[in-house]
Amino acid sequence: MKALTLEGYVAALLVDSSTTRKELAQVLGCTPETLKKKLTGKSELTVQDASVIAKKVSRHDVFDTFDELCRLAATKKATQLTRN
């Protein structure tokens, strides 16, 4: 079973909420390219970003979505730190 990634989780949320990456980037105040960098770990995903994403795309419990976004972002960061 493949581990869930931050990018994959957000992609699933976008599909579920019928939101585009462009729309999400606009809500975050960034370009779609910057959003991609945030989701792939090349740029920092802040707690504020996670909150905005959860509020925009969560169809169920916003707090659970927020928690999962933060967990995946932290896992991504920890993985990067151990590789360097």
Image (spheres, rainbow, N blue to C red):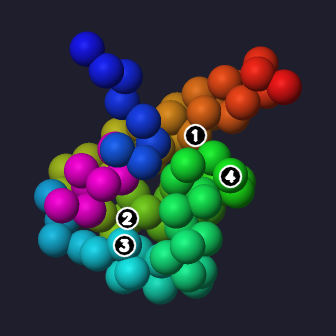
| Residue holding disc 3 | 21
Cα separation, mark 3 vs mark 4, equals 17 Å
| Residue holding disc 4 | 42
Q: Amino acid at mark 4?
A: Lys
Q: Earlier in the sequence, mark 2 or mark 4?
A: 4
Q: Identify the residue at horizontal 42%, vertical 48% (top origin).
A: 7
Question: Which stretch did the figure color magenta?
Answer: 9-15
Determine whether label 3 and label 4 are within 8 Å by CB: no
Is 4 on the left-hand or right-hand side of 81? left
Determine whether label 3 and label 2 are within 8 Å by CB: no
Q: Earlier in the sequence, mark 1 or mark 4?
A: 4
Q: Amino acid at mark 2?
A: Lys
Label of residue 73 in the image: 1
Is 25 on the left-hand or right-hand side of 8? right
Vertical arrangement, residue 19 with respect to residue 83, above or below = below
Vertical arrangement, residue 54 with respect to residue 32, above or below = above
User: Is residue 67 at all visible to an observer of this figure?
Assistant: no
Q: Identify the residue at horizontal 34%, vertical 44% (top origin).
A: 9
Instruction: Give the number of the mark in front: 3 or 2.
Output: 3
User: Is residue 60 at all visible to an observer of this figure?
Assistant: yes
Q: Amino acid at mark 1?
A: Ala
SS at mark 3? Answer: helix
| Residue holding disc 2 | 55
Is 64 on the left-hand or right-hand side of 28? left
Q: Amino acid at mark 3?
A: Arg
Q: Earlier in the sequence, mark 3 or mark 2?
A: 3
Cα separation, mark 1 vs mark 2, equals 17 Å
